[in-house]
Amino acid sequence: MKTTLYVCLLAVLVLAQGQHPHTPAAGSWEGDLEGVRAVTVNLRGPEQRLDGGVVFYILKDEGSGFHTGAASAEVPMEGLRRNGDVVRFWVRGSNGEPISFEMRITEPGHARLTRLKSGATPELTVALWRQTEN
């Protein structure tokens, strides 16, 4: 009986090592596309009451590869909610239509931001890394 208990406890410890604990989302996250800065995600507040905004950068190619262009004003996140290591939100596009995003924390300091497919707008994923913690 004791051997079975020890084996079960050992199995639980081994399985738990493969999972990272709840990682904080608050902070400033940067993302590149084609090797240049494309987005900054700013999450503020305590984890239970996150809010924030997104800055998008115009990417332009003048014949020598992509370059980061002008930054948008910070666009407020709406409908922000967190479930484990996934943060979901939407922002209003320039035409007023909602654009949905999912930010998945993959490991401490690293995440993936996905613009979800909507109508003719295709899904797009950008790797993020945390710049600062808030």
Image (cartoon, rainbow, N blue to C red):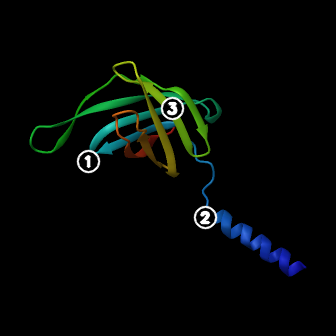
Question: Which residue is denoted by mark 3 in the rendering?
Answer: 89
Where disc 1 sits, the SS reads loop
Q: Mark 1 and 3 residues: CB-CB less than 8 Å, in contact?
A: no
Q: Could you tell me which quadrant the N terminus lies in? A: bottom right
Instruction: Give whichever of 98, 24 is nearer the camera.
Output: 98
Instruction: Give whichever of 99, 69 is nearer the camera.
Output: 99
Q: Where is residue 62 in the image (x, y as percent from the top left)?
A: 10, 37
Q: What residue is drawn where x is 64% and y is 65%? A: 17
Instruction: Give whichever of 14, 133 is nearer the camera.
Output: 14
Q: Position of residue 85 (x, y in %)?
A: 57, 46
- Which of the two discs, 1 and 3, labels the residue nearer the N terminus? 1
Q: What residue is drawn where x is 48% and y is 49%? A: 109
> What's under tag 1, amino acid-wise?
Gly
Using the image, tell me which numbered label, if any, was put on residue 11. none
Q: How many labels does the image show?
A: 3
Q: Mark 2 and 3 residues: CB-CB less than 8 Å, in contact?
A: no
Question: Which residue is denoted by mark 2 in the rendering?
Answer: 18
Q: Position of residue 4 (x, y in %)?
A: 84, 78
Using the image, tell me which numbered label, if any, was put on residue 35. 1
- Which of the two discs, 1 and 2, labels the residue nearer the N terminus? 2
Label 2: how many Cα within 10 Å (few below 14, some 14–19, many 20+): few
Q: Is residue 37 visible?
A: yes
Q: Mark 1 and 2 residues: CB-CB less than 8 Å, in contact?
A: no
> What's under tag 2, amino acid-wise?
Gly
Q: Say which quarter of the image contains residue 119.
A: top left
Q: Residue furthest top?
A: 96
Q: Say which quarter of the image contains residue 7.
A: bottom right
Q: Residue furthest right?
A: 1
- Which of the two discs, 2 and 3, labels the residue nearer the N terminus? 2
Where disc 3 sits, the SS reads strand
